[in-house]
Amino acid sequence: MKYKYLTEDIIQKIEECRGRFPLKEQCIIPALHHILDKHRDIVPEAVIELSDYLKVPVSHIEGIVTFYDMFRHRKNAKNHIRICRNLPCHLANFHSLLEKIKEKTGADVGRSSSDGLWYIELVECIGSCGIAPAFLVNDDLYDGSKIKTEEDLEKILSKYR
Amino acid sequence: MSIRDKIPHIPEIHVESNLNLLLRRAKENRTVDIEEYETTGGYSALRKALNKFSPEDIVVLVEESTLRGRGGAGFPTGRKWRFALMNPPPRYLVCNADESEPGTFKDRIIIERDPHLLLEGMIIAGYALGAKEGYIYIRGEYPAGYLILENAINEAKERGYLGKNILGTDFSFDIKVYRGAGAYICGEETALLESLEGKRGHPRLRPPYPAQSGLYGKPTVVNNVETLSNIPIIITYEAYFMNIGPAGFYGPKLFPVSGKVEKPGVYEATMDITLRELIEMAGGVKGGKQVKAVFAGALGIYREDELDMPMDYSPKGFGGTGTTIVLDEDDCVIDALLVVTQFFHHESCGKCTPCRVGTYEQHQILKKLKEGKATKEEVNYLKHLSQNIPANSICGLGFSAPNAVSDALKKFSEEIEAHLKGECPVCFNRGD
């Protein structure tokens, strides 16, 4: 089978993982993280390739992809914004932050922006309640309470364009 | 170049401590490297443990310290270790770094700022348990923490604190980090083990307990980050550890305080601190307003007149992870419950029907209640569910999911009445 999503560098990382952990199933979650980092999405073809490579049933990998929130089948944009909607961020009015981000990026919750740059997701607690409302842009964490003006937000978002 | 230049952005989180034990090196937003850790007394507890104590001595010290699990359940750590030691090797040590309870952000401070404290605790625990391998299961949403831990492990290996023949003894130990992928349930120890073995994070039926049959079917101890970070402190202070805090609940504890307070952040204190004192430590309620309710412990909900209870694990204490989320007079309890039930419904793994469906039903009823459309029968059904979800679920998520709802039914009946009549001043005057 020829691989499109399992590129050389990802295969190398999976091999590293295989050397570390005794079970081949233990490479699934790390491999999916690598696929997600590189392709910003886990499409069914990637799951089939991984299943072929690790010799693990597709159903097992699919079971993992659907169980863990970070691995959803969705056509994601270049940048993934995750806004926390849990209690401390709710009390700190994440809705107003969401509106600002929506306006600035053109994306909506569960929908990418038309320029393909942004995708917004509302997530449960991201363990940053001291800086509520907290949000992640890809892997970077930000303090929503510090965003007072449009410029503050623009300063952050401009790094990812 | 410090590790901070190579990892994702982490903003400043406020941290305060008068004890200077767990947070001694963690007050500023930076990562303490091994150099600094060593010069500030780091790894001296490991040296002491290996040179002065037998593994049995360490287990006895931990038992005598009355250290309790800081992950929420408050189970005595020494007893957990003793159970695992009753079973033959190989044994495994797993560190639970999957903190994801709403309002909890204490473990990330240790991981991101003082990772060697955790590693030192794990190495000592590994020695006491006769384990050869330890795992850290870190939640997927802490990518920076994952990289910091990997880096710290490499630093420790270079200096001979990890790997083969640690500090010239015949004890060998290795630590591996495993990243989760965004499932709250994986903080439950058996679900964590399933996830660590590369499966869906469904809790296992107990018995057998992880101490008998855990990771790869072998005896396993699963401890929280904060619990393991207490181990070097116990080894350093020995009997003096019992001078820290109240009898039976010795040792420092981290309290993450959030919501409507002046200075949200992580506070280190002894467990005799009351919730009221803790809120004062965090600068009091924002804007000098009154406390309406506090979500504390295992996400129970408390009234203003209950704030003088201590934050310990006694039946009268708050217990749990030490989480404190403050609601002021402008917040509606039903509105907050709606967020909490949505969370539990979302995070229920689906294995036990009462939890999977019950949390959904609770959320739907509360939604109607908030809009002023619920009936008295539905509120009674809410009560029925609050008793039946914990009674018919197999893990801690099901046991604690309806805590807040059942507490609110008991303690905030006037708010519920107001919603039944459509008269809540917060919800109905705001126009939403």
Image (cartoon, rainbow, N blue to C red):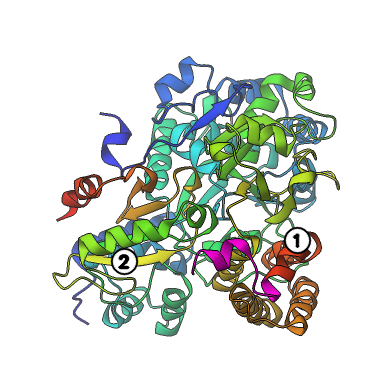
Tell me the amino acid under the disc marked 2.
Ile
B389 lies above or below B430:
below
| A76 on left or right of B165 | left
| B56 on left or right of A60 | right
Numbered range of the magenta stretch: B419-432
Residue B220 in percent (x, y) is at 67, 54
Q: Is residue B215 magenta?
A: no
Chain letter of the residue carrying label 1: B
Q: Are marks 2 and 1 in contact (CB under 8 Å)?
A: no
Instruction: Name the residue nearer the viewer: B109 or B427.
Output: B427
When asked about the image quadrant of residue B226, the answer is top right
| A125 on left or right of B351 | left
The answer to whether residue B172 shows anywhere in this view is no
- Residue behind mark 1: B412
The answer to whether residue B277 shows anywhere in this view is yes
Chain letter of the residue carrying label 2: A
Residue A25 in percent (x, y) is at 46, 69
- Residue behind mark 2: A120
User: Which quarter of the figure is the N terminus of chain B placed in?
Assistant: top left
